[in-house]
Image: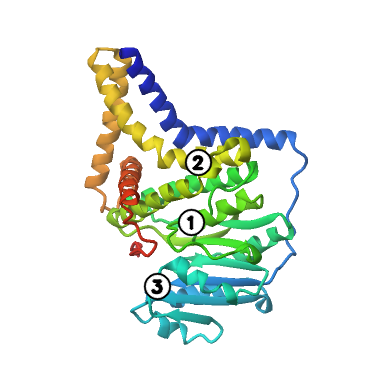
Amino acid sequence: MEIAIEICFWLGIFIIFYSYLGYGILLFVLVKLKRAFSSAHKEVDADFLPNITHVIAAYNEEDFIREKIANSLNLDYPKDKLKVIIVTDGSSDRTMDIIKEYPEVEHHHEDKRSGKIAAVNRMIPYLKTDITVFSDANTLLNQDALRNLGRHFANSKVGLVAGEKRVLSKDKDGAAASGEGFYWKYESKLKKWDSELHSVVGAAGELFAIRTELFHPVDTNIVIEDFYISLSLAMEGYKVVYEPDAYAMESGSASVKEELKRKIRIAAGGIQAVVKLKGLLNIFKYGVLSFQYISHRVLRWTLAPLCLILVLLANIYLAYLQIPLYQLILVCQIAFYAFSIIGWLLQNNNLKLKIFFIPYYFSMMNYAVFRGFFRYMKGSQSAVWEKAKRAA
């Protein structure tokens, strides 16, 4: 029995390490090897400027919508090649009245609130340009974002270009903003390497561009539609690339409670995506894409959180047998979770020292996966959800 528990312990350690750090290390090595053995990198055509429709879905954004519109209209892109559409549904504040002050912006509204993807689906008949760019209403884009996204479509094999999400942080931030900022910096690096190796494994809805002819109505029950759309195109054989020089900036979540609400929704959507994209688990059919998908996403939404519990319980048993190695590892585990608890106690304090916030954010993310799994099983996660409040 002891041997079986040791095997489970080390297997669990491997899955946890590989899911969060090991895959990143392996990905880095594979990208380096690809650079060494492949031909010279082909530059994208910086002069390629396709016609673009910029679609922004907004719900109760009266505090930010003016800034978003100003940002969208002042991006560095030829005005005769750019159309801006804002779609609203169910807004109960002054968002619609503010949008009407800008005749340069095309506005579509529906009183009934059906959710973001339902609102975006309504826009399909109005999308006449070659490329459609989606960005969130609470984000600001860098000046060259549209140019940097659009240039990739000079390659007819490119179906979607994922921009980068940047979480703005200050020296003194609470646990939510600090943890989210650190997480997205790491995620952005993985996305860059994923793209260079083969394909981005899921675009962030904050900013992505798609070849309009490839955008079709999405089931309104899909929770994380950006992830589903990008992976579906990759499965069809289109290139899904990453462009770090096109980025959407937003502040971190206002509190851990708000960030947890967002993470639970994403986790429920992740489980849903694993079920709906189950064909992508066939590595014999999709090869490298399946390898990336399983390594980067599936393990984090399934086995890794379970292994955290398995490893802790197995470690307690093995340490009880007076085995020094397992006693030392248990001390390290206890220290990590103690840091998480301290981070929880200090979660709303704006501190320069972030050492407690990262363990807490990691623990919170994995707790959210369990909550998301049960929410998915109950069928209680709606695609229409209460958005998380962002920090000022």
**Could you tell me which residue is drawn at 50 percent across and 41 percent down?**
296
Q: Amino acid at mark 1?
A: Arg
| Residue 143 visible at all | no
Say which of marks 2 and 1 sits in front: 2
Q: How far apart, in angstroms, are the residues tagged by discs 3 and 1?
A: 21 Å
CA neighbours of label 2 inside 10 A, class few (<14), some (14 to 19), many (20+): many
Q: Do the CB atoms of the residues marked 2 and 1 lie less than 8 Å apart?
A: no
Image check: 43 left or right of 311? right
Q: Position of residue 22 (x, y in %)?
A: 49, 32
Disc tally is 3
**Reading the chain from its start, which is encountered first: label 3 or label 2?**
3
Q: Amino acid at mark 2?
A: His
* SS under mark 1: strand
Residue nearest the viewer, comparing 376 with 104: 376
**Reading the chain from its start, which is encountered first: label 3 or label 1?**
3
Residue matched to label 2: 296
**Reading the chain from its start, which is encountered first: label 2 or label 1?**
1
Q: Quadrant of the N terminus?
A: top left
Instruction: Locate residue 62: give its quadrant.
Output: bottom left
**Could you tell me which residue is drawn at 36 percent across and 54 percent down?**
265
Q: How far apart, in angstroms, are the residues tagged by discs 2 and 1?
A: 19 Å
* SS under mark 3: loop
Q: Amino acid at mark 3?
A: Tyr
Instruction: Locate residue 389: give its quadrant.
Output: bottom left
CA neighbours of label 1 inside 10 A, class few (<14), some (14 to 19), many (20+): many
Q: Position of residue 303 (x, y in %)?
A: 40, 35
Residue matched to label 1: 166
Judge whether 338 appears above or below 7 on screen: below
Residue matched to label 3: 59
